[in-house]
């Protein structure tokens, strides 16, 4: 049934996928977690190292589906304070052969109140760690952005295991400017203060120079961040000139950059890496890729694009390979 998906236009497939996911989870899901390479960090237990990346369950409507399909943890969002629609025009496209996605979504989501409601509704049956990925509304200026992040942190920190500060989406104008030294330090400080001891991670872009990456890492740590997600989607078009300049590429197209960013950040962190949570996302398409990210030094791994190309059974396939 899954290969049929390929013949449906990307936007329609994207709109239908929540229904498909719920049906699939009802038939193929399990009430047992998939356990392989279990991991504990900061009092949080992960039955396995593979979770869903930001943007997959933007509205926290499928937490229990992903749990039953074998995810080891779940990142909801990106959540913004107010609901907002996607960017105008075409927002998603895919290259099946190259396992690459292009998207220009721009945080379409139901807004904090409704997402909070959805999260609470799933809590009594949820056994997995939930991270809340937070961002700013597109109508909020960068100058006022920290207030959006603070509001979201105060609301979600008591209900989740960690917060992920998203300053790396290429689809909200100017958002990536918040990754630069002083701005990032001020922003993360405010989030850490509002998070009342819940760990705060920072999600960074794969498109930074080494200097920019190191500055962003230092700024985050000096502000009290406890880890990172490396990385978001890429603006690089060198191998994919057919896509528009705006929008982010994921899947194969970002794999080398994400891996290089992970390696370079870990090399820079050195001894300071101890105690941090390092999450790798970007171009993870096989169990072998997961093994590589872990062997390089990631604690956890996340996926988005491969779920589009391979379907939601990916978690079960990976568990089989790790248990073989
Ligand atoms: C359609 C789409 C929507 C996304 N939305 C978000 C988002 O809302 N927040 C976020 O932090 N990342 C978002 N991402 C980025 C992913 O979380 C991930 O960092 C990136 O796609 C690289 O992983 P992948 O190669 O496994 O897809 C999105 C990616 C795609 C493809």
Image (cartoon, helix red, strand yellow):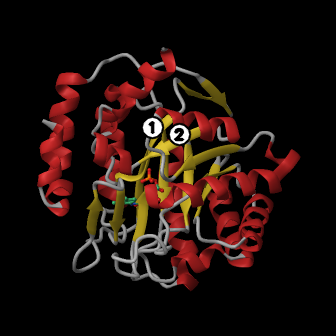
Per the image, label 2 sits on a secondary structure element best described as helix
Residue 23 vs 208, above or below: the answer is above
Q: Name above or below for residue 256 compared with residue 106.
A: above
Residue at 17 percent across and 51 percent down: it is 6
Please state the horizontal and vertical placement of residue 175, each as a whole percent of the image: 52, 77
Counting from the top left corner in percent of width and height, residue 7 is at 12, 53
Please state the horizontal and vertical placement of residue 232, each as a whole percent of the image: 51, 61
Numbered circle sitting on residue 289: 2
**Closer to the camera in the image, 250 or 228:** 250
Write down the quadrant of residue 24 in the picture. Answer: top left
- The residue drawn where x is 50% and y is 73% is 236
Residue visible at 49% across and 85% down?
Answer: 141
Locate residue 127, reporting x and y percent.
Answer: 43, 26
- Answer left or right for 101 relative to 141: left
Is there CB contact under 8 Å for labels 1 and 2? yes
Indicate which quadrant contains ligand 1: bottom left
Element at badge 1?
Answer: loop
Number of other residues with Cα within 10 Å of mark 2, as a class: few under 14, some 14 to 19, many 20 or more: some
Q: Which residue is mark 1?
A: 286
Q: CA distance from mark 1 to mark 2?
A: 5 Å
Residue 230 visible (yes or no) = no
């Amino acid at each position: 049934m899954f290969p049929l998906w390929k013949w449906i236009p990307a936007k329609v497939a994207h709109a239908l996928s929540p229904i498909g996911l719920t049906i699939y989870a009802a038939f193929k899901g399990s009430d047992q977690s998939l356990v392989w390479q279990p991991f504990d960090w900061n009092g949080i237990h992960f039955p396995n190292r593979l979770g869903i990346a930001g943007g997959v369950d933007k509205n926290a409507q499928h937490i229990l589906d992903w749990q039953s399909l074998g995810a080891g943890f779940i990142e909801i969002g990106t959540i913004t304070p107010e609901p907002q629609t996607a960017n105008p025009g075409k927002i998603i496209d895919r290259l099946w052969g190259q396992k690459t996605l292009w998207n220009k979504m721009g945080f379409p989501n139901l807004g904090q109140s409704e997402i909070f409601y959805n999260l609470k509704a799933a809590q009594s049956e949820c056994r997995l760690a939930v991270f809340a990925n937070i961002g700013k509304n597109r109508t909020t200026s960068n100058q006022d952005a920290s207030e959006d992040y603070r509001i979201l942190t105060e609301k979600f920190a008591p209900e989740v295991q960690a917060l992920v500060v998203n300053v790396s989406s290429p689809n909200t104008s100017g958002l990536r400017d918040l990754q630069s030294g002083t701005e990032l330090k001020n922003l993360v400080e405010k989030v850490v203060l509002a998070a009342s001891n819940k760990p705060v991670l920072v999600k960074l872009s794969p498109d930074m120079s080494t200097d920019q990456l190191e500055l962003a890492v230092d700024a985050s740590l000096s502000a009290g961040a406890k880890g990172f997600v490396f990385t978001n989607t890429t603006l690089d078009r060198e191998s994919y000139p057919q896509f528009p300049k705006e929008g982010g590429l994921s899947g194969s197209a970002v794999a080398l950059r994400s891996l290089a960013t992970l390696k370079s950040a870990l090399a820079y962190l050195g001894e300071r890496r101890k105690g941090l949570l390092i999450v790798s996302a970007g171009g993870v398409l096989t169990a072998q890729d997961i093994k590589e990210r872990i062997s390089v030094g990631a604690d956890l791994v996340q996926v988005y694009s491969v779920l589009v190309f391979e379907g939601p059974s990916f978690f079960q396939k990976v568990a089989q390979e790790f248990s073989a």
